[in-house]
C-alpha cells in the first residue's frame, strides 16, 4: 500500500504558478516528480498560492487553510514560499519591511513546525535589478532565520538570476513571472534539493 502524503504549498503568485500556460507551476511539477520518483508515495497537492500576498497575508491565513486540508492520519508537509511582494515599493514605502517580514516568517514557521514537517523555498528574482537587491537581502536573512529554528530552507534567487531561461521568460512575460520553462527550472532546483527527497 502506498503512503498517503498530503502537501500544502502556501505562498504568493510564484506558488500559484502565475504566468505558466500549463497551469502546473513549480508546485505541480515537483509533486508529480516526487510521485514518479517514489513508488511508495501517493501525493495529494494543495496549491494555496495567492497573487500579491505578503508575509502578513500568509500569517493571517495559513493555519486555517492548511488545517482543513491536513486533518487525518497520513503524511503531512507544509511548504512555504514568500517574500517578493514584501519587497515591492508602493507609495514610496516597502509593502512589508524586512524586519516585519522576518517577524512574520518566524511566527509562521515556528507554529507550523510544531504541527508537522515544514520546508521553505526562498523568493525568486524578477526583471527589476533594484528590487532583486532587496530580494537577495531578504533571502539571506530568511536563510539565517530558518537555520536558527531548524527549518530547511532552499535559496533559489542567485541560481535563477543567472539562469537565462528564467530571466528571459520573466522579462518577456510581465516582468515578474516566468512561463512554463521558467517554472520547470525552479521545479528542478526543488526536486534536486536533498531536503525535498526526505519527504
Image (cartoon, rainbow, N blue to C red):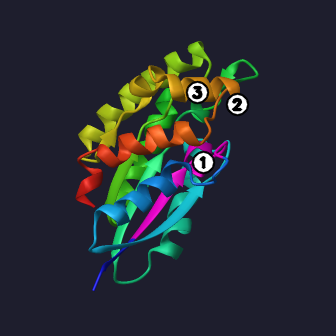
Judged by depth in the image, the label closer to the viewer, 1 or 3, is 1
Which of the numbered marks, if any, corresponds to residue 44?
none
Judged by depth in the image, the label closer to the viewer, 1 or 2, is 2
Q: CA distance from mark 1 to mark 3?
A: 19 Å
Q: CA distance from mark 2 to mark 3?
A: 20 Å
Q: Residue furthest top?
A: 130
Is residue 125 among what the camera can see?
A: no
User: Residue, x 39% and y 43% (percent of image)?
Assistant: 188
Judged by depth in the image, the label closer to the viewer, 2 or 3, is 2
Query: Is residue 50 in the magenta section?
Result: no
Residue holding disc 3: 87
Nearer to the camera, 4 or 173: 173
Provide the secondary structure element on which disc 3 rests: helix
User: Residue, x 48% and y 34% (percent of image)?
Assistant: 123
Residue holding disc 1: 17
x and y percent of residue 18 in the render?
65, 45
Against 199, is 110 above or below?
A: above
Q: CA distance from mark 1 to mark 2?
A: 13 Å
User: Residue, x 63% and y 35% (percent of image)?
Assistant: 177
Part of the protein shown in magenta: 6-20
Residue holding disc 2: 173
Is residue 169 among what the camera can see?
A: yes
Residue 180, quarter of the rendered image: top right
Residue 182, quarter of the rendered image: top right
Amino acid at each position: 500500500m502506498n503512503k498517503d502524503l498530503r502537501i500544502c504549498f502556501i505562498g504568493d503568485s510564484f506558488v500559484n504558478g502565475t504566468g505558466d500556460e500549463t497551469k502546473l507551476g513549480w508546485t505541480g511539477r515537483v509533486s508529480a516528480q516526487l510521485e514518479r520518483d517514489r513508488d511508495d508515495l501517493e501525493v495529494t497537492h494543495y496549491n494555496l498560492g495567492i497573487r500579491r500576498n505578503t508575509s502578513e497575508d500568509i500569517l493571517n491565513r495559513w493555519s486555517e487553510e492548511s488545517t482543513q486540508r491536513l486533518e487525518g492520519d497520513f503524511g503531512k508537509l507544509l511548504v512555504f514560499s514568500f517574500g517578493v511582494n514584501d519587497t515591492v515599493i508602493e507609495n514610496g514605502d516597502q509593502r512589508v519591511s524586512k524586519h516585519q517580514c522576518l517577524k512574520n516568517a518566524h511566527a509562521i514557521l515556528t507554529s507550523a513546525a510544531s504541527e508537522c514537517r515544514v520546508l521553505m523555498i526562498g523568493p525568486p528574482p524578477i526583471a527589476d535589478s533594484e528590487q532583486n537587491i532587496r530580494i537577495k537581502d531578504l533571502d539571506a536573512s530568511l536563510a539565517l532565520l530558518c537555520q536558527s529554528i531548524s527549518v530547511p530552507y532552499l535559496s533559489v534567487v542567485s541560481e535563477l538570476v543567472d539562469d537565462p531561461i528564467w530571466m528571459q521568460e520573466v522579462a518577456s512575460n510581465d516582468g515578474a513571472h516566468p512561463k512554463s520553462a521558467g517554472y520547470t527550472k525552479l521545479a528542478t532546483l526543488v526536486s534536486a534539493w536533498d531536503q525535498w527527497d526526505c519527504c
